[in-house]
Amino acid sequence: MTWLDPVVLTPLLGVLAGIVLGFVARSTHFCTLSALERHWYAGDSSGLRTWVLASLSALIGTQVLAAAGLADLSASFYLSSDFPWTGSIAGGFFFGIGMALVGTCGFGAVLRLGGGSLRALVVLAVIGLSALAAQRGILAVVRVPFVDDLAMSLPGSGSQSVGAIVSHLTGLPLQTFVAALVAAGGLAWVFGSASFRKQGAKILSAVIIGGVIAFGWWATTFAASLSFEPVQIEAGSFVVPVGDSILQLITYTGTWPDYGVGLIAGTLLGAVAAALWKRDIRWEACDDARELGRHILGGTLMGIGGVFAMGCTVGQGISAFSTLAVSAPVVMLSMAMGARVGLAWLVEGSALAAFRRNADGAGHAAE
């Protein structure tokens, strides 16, 4: 067996992509919750624009690869013919609340673990175990009738891609046009801020992060073309792969890790490298039982919610978005609402404050 064997190559490509992702994201403090929090409480949209630019960069890169035949998006589970709308809404909402309780998402927890946060280690363990329970354990008993059985069949296109749906409804090949329209509109908003246009480091980091996700589609498609065994076509997510990583560590299954597990490992290595470079490694633990309980509850909500929604902030917000999946905006809006409710409860003392137009309160410090 050589490194060119797909069994070895797939996780290796994941590790390499993860190292870049982890290093860049930790070095530039890329964080979904922080971006939303500063936008809501400080009126600072630079973090949100960075995050949106990463998604748009992934979209552009992915669609170019797909058009060139280098990425087989049709094999992605994000574009299955049935849209699990209940899971997208409820799962996204629960994930958002969990993200607020923890102070970051699963991706952010990996980045924090790279800097020595034992709180992040607890959160990742809980996310992984609860995700496994929701995917293939006792909680699947709830997921199947509530999510899978209620999935909605979308108009005859056989795909959740917005481009494919528009093409089916019009009878015209508009996939590329729809992708270009979304990208142009998004970029116009992102660079509509004069102050953001001056933040070269954030712009570069967003482009690199989006590029890593696009690379994932190419890498798994390439590995699948070489393999006689099924290879999951994926780009990046930090819920189920966390659970799969735990299984790889504690059990002997006789199978090699997949791309997602490699990406988790690589992201951690990249985060460690960034923390060492910035001299930002220090041990951190929960201050008391109350904080520990909040992190455990938040991790549980993210693990279950991420499986129900079929992705996390990276999985749906960047990976699924790059395929133009219908689920991506639905899940992200649900996550944003859940995060808003969770932050309102923590910061303002009442979840109802999330529904006020102009909520007052100091920013919730990301832990």
Image: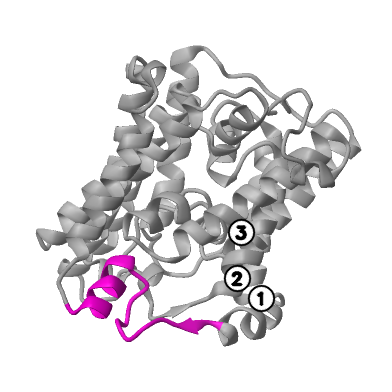
Looking at this view, is 27 or 282 the one in front? 27
Q: Residue at x 64, y 61 (%)?
A: 305
List x then y, in percent, for residue 133.
67, 70
**Residue type marked 3:** Gly
**Residue type marked 2:** Gly
Q: Residue at x 44, y 22 (%)?
A: 27
Residue farthest to the left? 68
- Write down the residue under mark 3: 92
List x then y, in percent, for residue 287.
84, 28
Q: Which mark is residue 87?
A: 2
Whether tag 2 and tag 3 are in contact, CB under 8 A, the answer is no
| Neighbour tally class for label 1: few under 14, some 14-19, many 20 plus, Cα within 10 Å | few
| Neighbour tally class for label 3: few under 14, some 14-19, many 20 plus, Cα within 10 Å | many
Looking at this view, is 76 or 185 the one in front? 185
Q: Which mark is residue 137?
A: 1
Q: Which picture quadrant has residue 37?
A: top right
Q: Is 296 positioned to the left or the right of 19 in the image?
A: right
Q: Can you tell which of label 3 and label 1 is closer to the viewer? A: 3
| Neighbour tally class for label 2: few under 14, some 14-19, many 20 plus, Cα within 10 Å | many
Magenta stretch containing residue 334, yes or no? no
Magenta stretch containing residue 167, yes or no? yes
Q: Which picture quadrant has residue 28?
A: top left
Label 2's element? helix
Whether tag 1 and tag 2 are in contact, CB under 8 A, the answer is no
Please provide the residue range marked out in magenta. Answer: 151-171
In primary-sequence order, the first of circles 3 and 1 is 3
* Disc 3/disc 1 C-alpha distance (Å): 20 Å
Q: Is residue 159 above or below residue 122?
A: below
**How many numbered markers are drawn?**
3
* Disc 1/disc 2 C-alpha distance (Å): 17 Å
